Each structure stands twice: as C-alpha cells, then as structure tokens.
Amino acid sequence: MAKSTMKAPMLAKMFLAGAKNLEAKKEWINELNVFPVPDGDTGTNMTMTIMAAAAEVQNLGEDLDMASLAKAISSGSLRGARGNSGVILSQLFRGFTKGISKYEVLDVVILSDAFQKAVETAYKAVMKPKEGTILTVAKGAADKALELIGETDDLEEFLAKVIAQAEYVLSQTPEMLPVLKQAGVVDSGGQGFVTVLQGAYDALVGKEIDYTLEGTQASSGVVKISQQAEQDIKFGYCTEFIIVLHQPLEEKGEIDFKAYLESIGDSIVVVADDEITKVHVHTNDPGLVIQRALTYGSLSKIKIDNMREEHQEKLIKDAQKAAQEQKQADEKRRRERAALEEAAHKIPKKEMGFISVSIGEGINEIFQGLGVDYIIAGGQTMNPSTEDMLNAIEEVNADNIFILPNNKNIILAANQAASLMEEKNIYVIPTKTVPQGITALINFMPDSTPEENAARMTEELSSVKTGQVTYAVRDTIIDDKSIKQGDYMGMGDSSILSVGKDMEQVTKDMVGQLADEESAVISVYYGQEIAEEAAQKLGGEIGEMYPNCEVEVHYGGQPIYYYLISVE
C-alpha cells in the first residue's frame, strides 16, 4: 500500500536508522580518504556529528512532534559537528529541518522543499564550495526531488528515486575531481550522505537488512547492502511478557524455567522477584513459551515481534543505545565544565584570549608558552566538535577570543562555533597546521586592537610552509606517485612531496621541496615515536643541507606523524 504522508515518529525512526547505517560503515568510509594516511576520518566525523543529534532525538521519547524533532536534529548536529564533512552534514540537517518544522504531516512536496533548503543552507556555509563533494551529491538528490513533484506522491517511490540519483552523482564524483579518479575512490563525504539516506529508506519500507558490506569497491558509488537470508535467523519471534506470580518463584523453579526456554530458544532474560517475573526469549514457537509461563501465574504486557520483519527496530534501538551512551558522556563533560567554570571565576578577565587545537605534550607546552589560555585536545587524529569549541570559549575569561584550529578540517567547526556565540567576540584565524598556529601567535601584538591582530595573524600565515611525515595505510597513486602500504610519505600543504622506505630520507626530500633561497628558519617537531637522539641527528643533517638557515629541533610528542616541519 502506497504511503503518501508521514508524521514525526516515522521520521525519527528514519533518522536514527540513517545514523545507525552510517555508524556501521564509518570505518569503510574512512578508508575512502584520498590520501592513504592512518587518520582518514570522514566516516568518524560524520558519525559523531549525526550521533550527537541522535542523542537529542532519543531524549524526545516516543511522544514527539515535528517541531521538537526538527530542533533536536538541528541543534544536536550543529553542536556535535566535527570536521568539514560533519559541519556540512549538520548544515544539510539544519536546512532540511527548517523545511519541515512547521508541519505535522510531511508529503512529497514538503520533503522536496526541505531538500532544497538543505542544499541552499549547506552551500552558504562553505566559503568556496567545490564540486565533486558531498555538496554535489546532496544537490543531485535535491534536484531529483524537485523533478519528482507531480510525478508521484508515494514516499517510498519518491525516496528510492532520490537515492538512486544521489548514488549516480556519487559515482560521477571521480570525473569531477581528478584526485578522486587517480586514487580510485568516490568522495567520502558524499558516500556518507548516501549511506544516511539508504538507512532512512530502509526504515521507511521496513526492510530487513544486514549492514555487513558485500563489497567495498568505491568506484561503484553505491554501498552494497545485502538482505539477510530468512534462514539465517535461527529463532524468528522475539517474545516478551510479565508473569504475575501465583507464588514466589523459587530458585529451582527459575532454573527449570530457564532450562526449558533454552531448549526452544535463545537470547533469554528472566528477571524475577517475589511478585512478578519479566521474560524475554527468541523462539520459533511463542505459544509453547506462553503455555509454560501460565503454569506460574497470569500474564500481562505480552509482546511478540516477528524478527524477520522487525529487524529494523533492533537497528534503531542500537542507535538509541549509542545515543544514550553519548548523552552520559556529555553529562560527564558538563560536570567537568561546571567545575572548571567555578575555577574560572577566580581568574581576572582580560581583553584578549586564545584557544588552540593541539595534540602532543611538547606542542601543547609550546602553545602554552606563547600565551594560549585553553588547549582543545585534537587535531588531525581527532577533529574537535563545534560543542568542544563552544565549551572552550566559555572557559576563557576574555571579551575577545582568537581560535587557532591548526587543521584545515577544523576551520568550519570553529567558524560554526563563532556564529553561535553572542556574548563574546570570536576571531577564527584560519590556521591549517600547527606551525601556522605558532606563527600566528608570534605575530600577536598586545597593544593592537583585536581586529588589527586578526588581520596581521592571518596575513602572516602565508609565510609558513608545512610538511608532515607519516605512513601509508594502503596502496594508491596520488600526485603521480606510486605509494605502497607501509611507505613513508612526506606531505606538504596540498600534496604529497616525497615517498619512500627510509623515513629520514623521505623527510629530507620533503624539506628539499619546501625550502628555497628565501628560507631562513626550519623548525623540526618530532613525534612521540621518535627518539630525541634521532631527531637531533636529522636536524643536524638538514642544517648541513641548508647552512644559511637556522634549524630548530623541538619535541612535539604528536601521534601518527613522525615529524612536523615548518619552513619560513
């Protein structure tokens, strides 16, 4: 039977199922990262973004309306957004929820309009939108939704065709971005978006699915989701009820009852007290379970679900459980923040303060030595969320606050936090690397105005060239370089500069492409896996290569990246 409308409870289920589908495939989406680095994080960032919203949705319970659902999705994803892909996803949700919040019943026309608003909002959030990304895939879906108005009012047919178009556009992203084609992958953010839509559609149609991937050939542009064979579910009926006992169930009686249930089912839970016993079992014959239970007392709240039809509900509950765990973690952070706020009241207020994203004991100390008030743990290995930024802003007792993201994938989240903060003036300095963050702080002048400092600090970023040395997690070809799993890679600000089996040689080759006749200072920050002796030796060799440059060696302590190099 065709479905032409839906209400808030169904949309909530679809949203949670989309979140669950994304969570199930996050590691695979991480592997679609163009650069074969060990911290590809698109899937993780998008998952953490949508799970923050899922926590808000889960808190609404079953009795919810469209306005409250829209607010939960929008606010949860905005504050939980991590990385560029997560911020863009949150903006898609923000625009979409604007399109539905005023309605209690949704149809094809309203949903199509919501898709348009989603894309419009997301494009506005990105200063220089690039085609061949999640934005392009979302636009393809929205264009198809608009085209379908008047052709069908069946929501299942509508969403199926929208997803099919999104999958097609995704498959074409390598033709739009040569770097994707060379790496043999589709856009990871676009794949994440399609994955959310696929999960939502599965909830709408009540499909029984297995979220295990059959294949991971990204070039197809489609996540392969196989339907779970019916015979793979050994016991098909989830049976639950309460026994109102005629008399207390003695230990032996409880053991005998459990043994009987084990003979005809699994997933058994029997919780008994003196008056009632709660029973849960998966079985192929609920009637036998009920007959035996009636020998102990009368039954109430009987619930029997055919799991071959209701498997989707399990997936949604999994998402709700994850959301609850996220809520508990958020509450813990809230308590910790409250304690910090109490301590902050003892710190005198100042005109200008600093927040820096950083990871690594040595790099943290450098930032603190340069006057940073609050360090957000994270960076390339874990992008902090908009919520993390807002919490940090609250901790810094200053009217004007400068944020140093120190990673190109964190700048959007910082800008989003700045747009949500009304009580303080926030200046996001678009630092893409740790060395740029250090340079920005060095160029801060206490006697200048916040606006003058922001302009100067931003202008000086162009004087810094950064290189990072890590290892490859898979074979690929990038920037016309053949890379094998386990190779060391020297990565510049926008490309891979050197590849090889010898870490020190790869590092020196990378520096050779960063330094020129105008270079004056080369700074080496060595990671947690590098011994000081090895780092000092490398610094000496670089100094011999560039006798006119001052070479500084510092302990960074950063994970995954063996060396961070800056050339100024």
Image: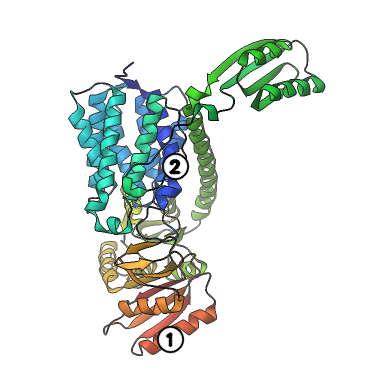
Residue 507's x, y, as percent? 41, 76
| Residue indicated by mark 1 | 541
Say few, some or many: other residues with alpha carbon within 10 Å of mark 2 (under 14 / 14 to 19 / 20 or more): few
Tell whether 321 sits left or right of 422.
right
Relative to 379, residue 135 above or below? above
| Residue indicated by mark 2 | 213
Quarter of the image with the N terminus is top left
The mark total stands at: 2
Most foreground residue, 290 or 428: 290
Residue at (71%, 10%) from the top-left corner?
Answer: 297
Among numbered discs 2 and 1, the one appearing first in the sequence: 2
Relative to 469, residue 136 above or below? above
Residue 253's x, y, as percent? 79, 19
Task: Point out the frontmost of discs 2 and 1.
Answer: 2
> For numbered disc 1, what is the local secondary structure?
helix
Which corner quadrant of the image does residue 184 belong to?
bottom left
> For numbered disc 2, what is the local secondary structure?
loop
Say few, some or many: other residues with alpha carbon within 10 Å of mark 1 (under 14 / 14 to 19 / 20 or more): some
Residue 75's x, y, as percent? 37, 38
Residue at (48%, 35%) from the top-left corner?
Answer: 319
Label 1 amino acid? Glu
Relative to 30, residue 271 above or below? above
Tell whether 226 sits left or right of 144.
right
Label 2 amino acid? Leu
Residue 470's x, y, as percent? 44, 67
Residue 177 is labelled as none
